[in-house]
Image (cartoon, helix red, strand yellow):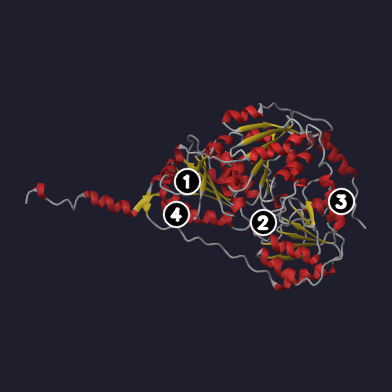
Amino acid sequence: MDHASAPAATAPANTQSDDQKTTMKSAELLVKCLENEGVEYIFGIPGEENIGVMDALLESDIEFITTRHEQGAAFMADVYGRLTGRAGVCMSTLGPGATNLVTGVADANMDRAPIVAIAGQGATTRLHKESHQILDLVNLFAPISKYSTQIREPEIVPEVVRKAFKFAQAEKPGASFIDFPENIAEMQTAIKPPLKRQAPISPTAPIGRCRDVAGMIAKAKKPLIIAGNGVIRYHAEQELVDLAEAINAPVATTFMAKGVLPSSHYLSLGTVGLKAKDYVAYAIEDADLVLCVGYDMVEYHPSLWNPNLDKRIVHVDGNPAEVDAHYIVEAGVIGDLRDSLARITARCEEGSKQAVKPKRDVIRKMLNEHAEDTSFPMKPQKIIHDLRTALDPEDILLSDVGAHKMWIARMYQAERPNTCIISNGFASMGIALPGAIAAKLVHPERNVVAVSGDAGFMMNSQEIETALRLGLNITNLIFNDGKYGLIEWHQLRHYGRKSHIDIGNPDFVKYAESFGAKGYRVEKAEDLIPVLKAAMADGTVSVIDCAVDYSENMKLTRQLKEMTSPFAA
């Protein structure tokens, strides 16, 4: 037989085919592991050092959302994690791409939102020396995450990814960071299945502790509940309502827990969180037992509501209480929050005889005193009243950080959990518009309104293009005062004069239109509700420019200074 007629079965090509079936690039394995975690979206920007992952995503069902800035990507992942309880994922390249993620990652970590951030990195062969765009990213992200690591070998990809998601999603949730060097991403590794997804089951509450707490409640004449973000994370809203009704205790929520008890409920006092004494703070002062349920100290420090160290405190949460001189608990119940609340409620024999309605009536009067105001520029109280009127109970409002945030936190009446999203632990400006994009992806059936000051809006306004490219219908309402209004408020309170807070703005209507979005300008107070409804019905991205009268800020400061408790016996 001559060579021309030899069979081709032993050709080297078959050996190469077998190799292709048994190995894959580390970048491909990373994507397989992300798929295993149920990742729907990755928010980020492609770069040179993450091109292996970007290429692998072309063969994946995971949708990569290309953003206009890495900070916007991190905020999107932040809000996605907060709304779903599953880790949002954001990605960048090395160096400046990774440092641009920092603010959003820190925000998620402090606001207890699960997030996994992934950054490309230079090759391991140049990490030991000065080299272009090289930073020690693992140590950079370590203080603002629960878990920060570098993938140093292809074989460890499944373990690193699983651990990152496990840490991010475990109570209390937060951030994980993965540094992925470009040469490791390109290395071949044996095909292996991603690791099984596992999560620990929260322990049940000890019966004895629940009985002790029920006994303390029985002896209290004026119990009060402070509900925090943990109630939302544990989906314990109904159990909270059941306990409050069983013991006839008014409920105050932190900024991030708005809606865990509907604002319309007869036991709802509203929101705590202003540093100055408000009506809700006086109601806490009047209480003889404070039950802190799912309470995150980072939101509203106990020194503000327990300044004299004299409050009897019960801590009900998934984690032990933080060590703090103003938060010495008399009893604690640690475990699954739904189970803990249900077990305490079952052991409460009779509710207190306290009169809650007078407290609530005082607060409701304050909330509605500007409902008919027609002055222009509009008072912040009136803008928030009209927002509440225009939005359905299930619609989502995302508040940026600024003076408007304080008014929203104080006055916006949320009827459902996670319908008023406020960055409060880290309190970062620029979150509202990117967050609204994530909220609309999670809940396309709901209206989503991002509320910003003019300064906060401009920090990530470029994401208008991202929202338009995705075909999203979101509304952006701007409280326009031409300055850093919250900083002016603090300056006037402390020094009686302002310093370097004035800014200039573009024509926001034309600015929106330059992207292809719709632009509206409110010319009189009566226009706001119709404009809001028209914008939400547009089916596209809309920007509403509304002038605000922030002279109300100092009026509130003076009012709170002069206020005395309407509740004390």
Residue 136 placed where, x, y %?
A: 53, 42
> Mark 2 falls on what kind of element?
helix
**Residue type (three-letter) at the residue carrying disc 3:** Val
State whether residue 330 appears in this view.
Answer: no
The residue labelled by disc 2 is 232
Between label 3 and label 2, give the one nearer the viewer.
3
**Residue type (three-letter) at the residue carrying disc 2:** Ile
Find residue 362 and name its label. Answer: 3
**Residue type (three-letter) at the residue carrying disc 1:** Phe
- Quarter holding the C terminus is bottom right
The residue labelled by disc 4 is 156
* Real-space CA distance between mark 4 and mark 1, rounded to the nearest whole angstrom: 11 Å
> Mark 4 falls on what kind of element?
helix
Q: Nearer the viewer, residue 499 or 135?
A: 499
The residue labelled by disc 1 is 180
Between label 4 and label 2, give the one nearer the viewer.
2
Q: Earlier in the sequence, mark 4 or mark 2?
A: 4
Q: Residues within 10 Å of mark 3 (few under 14, many from 20)?
A: some
Q: Residues within 10 Å of mark 1 (few under 14, many from 20)?
A: many
Contact check, label 3 and label 4, Cβ < 8 Å? no
Q: With respect to residue 336, does 65 lie above or below? A: above
- Quadrant position of residue 494: top right
Q: Residue at x 79, y 30 (%)?
A: 498
- Quadrant position of residue 476: top right
